[in-house]
Image (cartoon, rainbow, N blue to C red):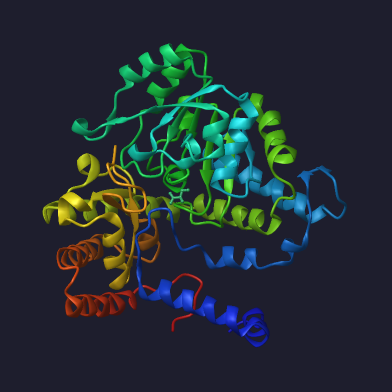
Amino acid sequence: MDLHRQLLAANDPEIAAAITGEEQRQRDGIELIPSENYTYPEVLAALGTVLTNKYSEGYPGRRYYGGQHFTDRIEDIARERARALFRAEHANVQPLSGSAMNQAAYLACLQPGDTVLAMDLSHGGHLTHGAPVSHMGRLFNFVRYKTQHNRQGAIDYDGLMEMARETRPKLVLCGFSSYPRELDYAAFRRIADSVGALAMADIAHIGGLVAAGVLRNPLDDGFDIVTTTVHKSLRGPRAGLILCRQTLAAAIDASVFPGLQGGPHMHTIAATAVTLRKASEPAFRDYGRQVLANAQALAQALVGAGVSLVTGGTDNHLLVLNTIDSFGLDGRRAETVLDEIGITANKQVVPDDPRLPLRPSGLRIGTPAATTRGMREDDMRAIAAWMVQALRHPDDAALLVRLAEEVRTFCRRFPLPGVAAA
Ligand code: DSN
């Protein structure tokens, strides 16, 4: 155990024991929540440093506190790496996480009451894309578009163009947290242009896949603003990035600080810089390809076993299962049953779900974390088989115990990055 952990164990055994327990949970189980990942040991090292002691309000060269020699260097490196990796004119690396980055982006370019076109939450959009329960949904006039269930979840771009002409949005937003298909960014750009709106993409989930070059980068299609989290497919610390045109740089920066946030978390920004360097290496492209290949293998195995997938499949890293149609179980029960055998997923609404979000009709799974641990297509087929057995027999306690043991044994083959073996 390293010195910091020894000190923690000696001085706060309760918290130390809970952290050790979480390490064990992560090591012994299969992580399928599509927004989670295992970060690099180097990122964990950067996070646990004295940078957490420092206030750095402002931006490099323009801070409100002294002692910024090293923090300026770190933030400059992080910004430069983000710009280079995503081919962006400007990058802000200070957003504390995904919701803050989207809020800062809206507040940079909209006035209260302005109209935004965004994807409906149950069709795959995110809370910050105008769900009525979010503050953003109250502040701006979000008009929601849906996907077409009978066309593999495709978006009706002609219909969206029509909707834009009727509603005159200031911002056309695309992106998602539970949509398994690729988007036509050029079509979104044309729709935004047709009404003089800005085009923004929230690639929070797929930022790593875009960085790896295995999914399309909306900046290459002339988007004005792109936001991404750092902790999902990018495999970094919990943080957000805003990438934008140079003409929006001053507004975005002012919106993040002082508009929305105070002191940036410099330990996280250092860890973000480390992540961005890793993502620019050739091995990360291989990782991105494997994430997609694993998602295909998982989807094919589930469909082959008769499971109903929203949109019928996936083009990215995530899948949404309709567990009511497939197993007669709501998403909450399905999540609990899988938890019992050591597979972590999350309940999920399906398009126009008649059920409530805490007991929805579906389950969301994805492959970024399992891929980081080294799992490949054959492993995805084994995981699909365990899932289907458990979900078909949720009340068979003996079966669930046996499957849990199989999952634990399987997981021993895949070490947890940055954590010593048990
Ligand atoms: N919580 C994230 C997700 O799971 O997709 C989005 O905020």
Q: Judge whether 100 appears above or below 381 on screen.
A: above
Q: Nearer the viewer, residue 34 or 270?
A: 34
* Residue at 60% across, 53% down: 272
Q: Judge whether 375 appears above or below 181 on screen.
A: below
| Residue 345: quarter of image | bottom left
**Residue 29: horizontal and vertical position, in percent?**
35, 72
**Residue 378: horizontal and vertical position, in percent?**
22, 63
* Residue at 79% across, 54% down: 55
* Residue at 29% across, 23% down: 156
Quarter the N terminus occupies: bottom right
Q: Nearer the viewer, residue 2 or 357?
A: 357
**Residue 303: horizontal and vertical position, in percent?**
15, 51
Q: Is residue 123 left or right of residue 242?
A: left
The reply to whether residue 87 is in sight is no
Q: Residue furthest bottom?
A: 10
Q: Judge whether 279 appears above or below 18 on screen.
A: above
| Residue 181: quarter of image | top left
* Residue at 22% across, 54% down: 297
Quarter the C terminus occupies: bottom left
The reply to whether residue 303 is in sight is yes
Q: Is residue 121 left or right of residue 100?
A: left
Q: Is residue 248 left or right of residue 176?
A: right
